[in-house]
Image (cartoon, grey):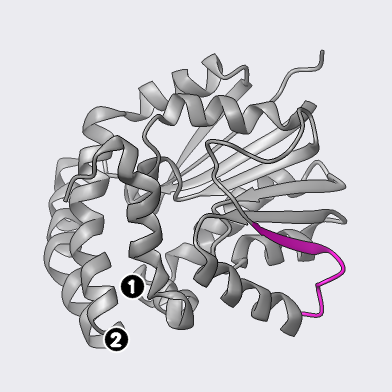
Amino acid sequence: MQVAGGDQNAFAQRLFTGLPRRYDALAELLSFGQNGRWRAEMVNHIAAGRPSSILDVATGTAGVALELVHRTPAEVTGIDITPAMLRRGRERVARAAATDRVRLVVGQAEHLPFADATFEALTFTYLLRYVADPAATLRELARVVEPGGSIASLEFAVPGSRFWRSWWWLYTRIVLPAAGYLTGGREWLTVGRFLGPNISAHYRRYPVDWTVDAWRKAGLVDVRVRPMSLGGGIVMWARKPES
């Protein structure tokens, strides 16, 4: 399933609008519990710096935002383009008694409604496959981070090993759609059918080396990459140099 560049935001909204109620539980189930481990690894690279302000982009139901609150002293702003996901996120934030430290807003990663150098750190998850211009989006993300601040991301990936890539292909094309339908209904069947081909297409166009170079061209330094779970996920992190 391919999406024209100008339609990607609208497509992502449609894709995720029906998912919030069971999103967090099913994300863990369908990733064999790896989603939480990957997320914790990403947060490690932000929490080490003890930032006081963090922007979480593509925050969804605020899972990363809440983990950042638990792991850092920061006030966290979460931004996402899907209002239904944010409504679920606000419920979770209220249940966690974190409304004084988490603010959730609707907005686009490509056009962040914040001034330059607003945040000490930034995270983003499962984002670059849903934007028309990943390089321009990375520049926009870097723009709102203070000099010396950190950025970290989490994304699905395609295993490099031919053996594990074959098993990954079978899982994403056959098991994931069926399991999504059985556990989450038609909306999760749609997501299950979409994810595998979308991930493969993204990395054919934007390999990991290209992405690392795009981070550097966005003005970031010390860019690091860690494949997760035999290459099914990838965590990246970097910092914005001091002025």
**Location of residue 20 in the rendering, given as x and y in whole percent from the top left corner:** 47, 76
Which residue is label 1 attached to? 30
Please name whichever residue, 72 or 166, is drawn nearer the observer in this view of the structure.
72
Q: Earlier in the sequence, mark 2 or mark 1?
A: 1
Is residue 111 visible in this depiction of the protein? yes
Residues drawn in magenta:
96-105
Query: Magenta span has 97?
Result: yes
- In the depicted structure, whether residue 216 falls above or below residue 120: above
Q: Give amino acid for label 2.
A: Thr
**Location of residue 123 in the rendering, given as x and y in whole percent from the top left corner:** 63, 46
Which residue is label 2 attached to? 183
Q: Separation of disc 2 and disc 1 at Cα?
A: 9 Å
On the picture, is 7 further left or further right than 1?
Answer: right
Q: Residue at x 18, y 64 (%)?
A: 193
- In the depicted structure, whether residue 76 falls above or below residue 189: above
Q: Kindly report which numbered mark, 2 or 1, lies closer to the viewer in this rendering.
A: 2
Please name whichever residue, 17 or 184, is drawn nearer the observer in this view of the structure.
17
